[in-house]
Image (cartoon, rainbow, N blue to C red):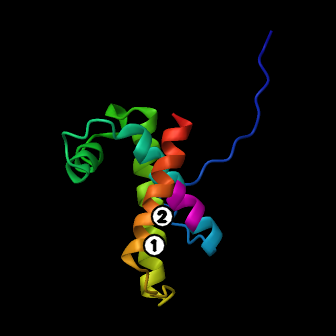
Amino acid sequence: MESKKVQAKEIKNDAILDIKVNKTFYLMSKSALFSTFSRIYKDTTVSSENFVKSIVSKKYEEMNDEERTFYTLSLLVGEIEKQAIETNSFIEKDISEKDLADAVALRASKKSNED
């Protein structure tokens, strides 16, 4: 019995796409990036910077799924931020050290409750 074929779409090798995103998509992408990072960064004896460098220096085939997800999201968020800078789409706002510390503590407590 012959198997049926279906059509599948794939982006061309030389295609470069310009994707429009809004703030919500950017924030969700950034949150997914940080969530992925917090799941895979467990060995705190290695600095977070060196940990990231170790991932991005690997070949695609050498990465596990979590590392691929982290790297992909890093590229996506980086491109969004690059375009936001180029189009003057960032705003700067002041945040107190206390508010920043409170936000970090809240995130840490949510993470420990999830574990």
Task: Work out whether 62 lies above or below 53.
Answer: above
Residue 107 percent across, percent down from the top left: 49, 54
Whether pointer 2 and pointer 1 mark residues with C-beta atoms closer than 8 Å, the reply is yes
Residue 57 percent across, percent down from the top left: 24, 46
Image side of residue 52 versus residue 77, left or right: left
Residue 82 percent across, percent down from the top left: 41, 76
Of residues 111 and 18, the one nearer the viewer is 111
Task: Work out whether 57 lies above or below 65.
Answer: below
Residues drawn in magenta: 27-31
Label 1, residues with CA under 10 Å away: few <14, some 14-19, many ≥20? few
For the question of whether residue 110 can be seen, the reply is yes
Q: Residue furthest bottom?
A: 88
Assign a secondary structure to mark 2. helix
Image side of residue 107 versus residue 82, left or right: right
Query: Magenta segment, principal secondary structure?
Result: helix
Tell me which corner region of the image, top left, top right, bottom left or bottom right, holds residue 104: bottom left
30 falls in the magenta region: yes
Q: Residue, x 55% and y 59% (percent of image)?
A: 29
Q: Residue, x 32% and y 32% (percent of image)?
A: 62
Assign a secondary structure to mark 1. helix
57 falls in the magenta region: no
Q: Amino acid at mark 2?
A: Ala
For the question of whether residue 21 can be seen, the reply is no
Which residue, given by chain and number where applicable, does mark 2 sit on?
Answer: 103
Which residue, given by chain and number where applicable, does mark 1 sit on?
Answer: 99
Tell me which corner region of the image, top left, top right, bottom left or bottom right, holds residue 22: bottom right
Label 2, residues with CA under 10 Å away: few <14, some 14-19, many ≥20? few
Q: Amino acid at mark 1?
A: Asp
Q: Residue, x 37% and y 75% (percent of image)?
A: 97
Tell me which corner region of the image, top left, top right, bottom left or bottom right, holds residue 54: top left
